[in-house]
Image (cartoon, rainbow, N blue to C red):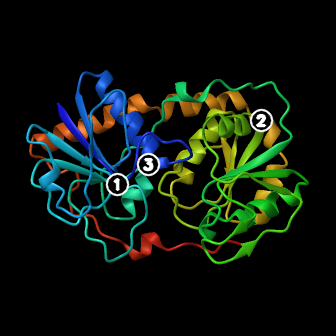
Amino acid sequence: MNILIIHNSRIPVFKYGGIERVIWVLGNELVKKGHKVTYLVKKGAYCNFAPVIFINDKIPINSQIPKDIDIAHIHFQPKEKIQIPHLVTMHGNLPPETSFFINTSYVSQNHAERYGADAFVYNGLDWDDYGFPDFNRKRNYVHFLGKAAWKIKNVKGAIKIAKENKTELKVLGGTRLNFKMGMRFTVTKWAKFYGMVGGTKKNELLKNSGALIFPVLWHEPFGLAIIESLYFGCPVFGTKFGSLPELINDETGFLSNSIQELIGGLKNHNLFDRKKCHEYAVSEFNSRLMAESYLKLYERILNGEKINRNIPQYIPGKNSLEKYLA
């Protein structure tokens, strides 16, 4: 199969880059399985296992697709009708007015259901990129991982949970002084900020952390931060929104929409079996499984099937939130 992966970003990823990381490992797995992969991505990208074409945002996507491509896998909502067999993966939460393609897949079951869709594929990572965790070392802090500038990610709530437990919170993905989302300066001795950290430095911080604090205030579509943290043996303490109840079970974390319950739950983070958290991430959320799942969708589409019974659309009731108790 000759597959074109399209995204308006650069690869490889050097810092966090969630979607970039996913499309990189997806392409690599597809090549390992004997398929030909080409990337259509932003100028400056490069790849050692597949050819790269630079995307031009000023001209139609259709005019940039090579003639020998069997299927295009697009990782954003295109504005034009794609003229060859194609799959669109939606990675985020898009507004009510968004028009979707029938062959759109989502990244969790909850994500798909909130748009009236059937098709979803869990994100997976190549765990060889992450080194191996040490389950026996003492862990004296917890962490937050995500774009802290987004209020929906609720770094404020994460700091409160850590503070009430008299535990240091290391914030990966934000700075103490934030200008991007309105000027905010976080004053607390309980949090240390590391910015948009990635690579070895991020892995070392996760390796030494006791838990991920993830009290998001939106429907998280998937959450790479969740599976990366589990890989390093960190149980997850978060809200019940979006994909979290789907990904986290009693052996891998604690979920509640009450901040007081999350404060109480964190006191027991050292009682979780860190090796079980790790094994769960490795077995359920790896790049091989992700690639195999997408290949099944590619085959259905090439056989003329529709992967959703109906055209996906924003469903207001399923996208509303219960109150988060501060």
Q: Residues within 10 Å of mark 2 (few under 14, many from 20)?
A: many
Classify residue 62 as left or right of residue 116.
left
The quarter of the displayed image where residue 159 is located: bottom right
* Distance CA(mark 2)–CA(mark 1): 34 Å
The quarter of the displayed image where residue 209 is located: top right
Going 60% across and 71% down the picture, which residue do you hit?
180
Classify residue 231 as left or right of residue 75.
right
The amino acid type, in three-letter code, at marker 1 is: Asn
- All told, the count of numbered labels is 3
The answer to which of 129 and 100 lies nearer the viewer is 129
The amino acid type, in three-letter code, at marker 3 is: Ile
The answer to which of 121 and 60 lies nearer the viewer is 60
Q: Is residue 1 visible?
A: yes
Residue 37 in percent (x, y) is at: 25, 33
Q: Which residue is mark 2?
A: 208
Q: Which residue is mark 1?
A: 8
SS state under label 3: helix
Q: Is residue 123 visible?
A: no
* Distance CA(mark 2)–CA(mark 3): 25 Å
Q: Which residue is mark 3?
A: 19
Whichever of labels 3 and 1 marks the residue nearer the N terminus, that label is 1
Going 36% across and 72% down the picture, which residue do you hit?
315
Q: Nearer the viewer, mark 2 or mark 1?
A: 1
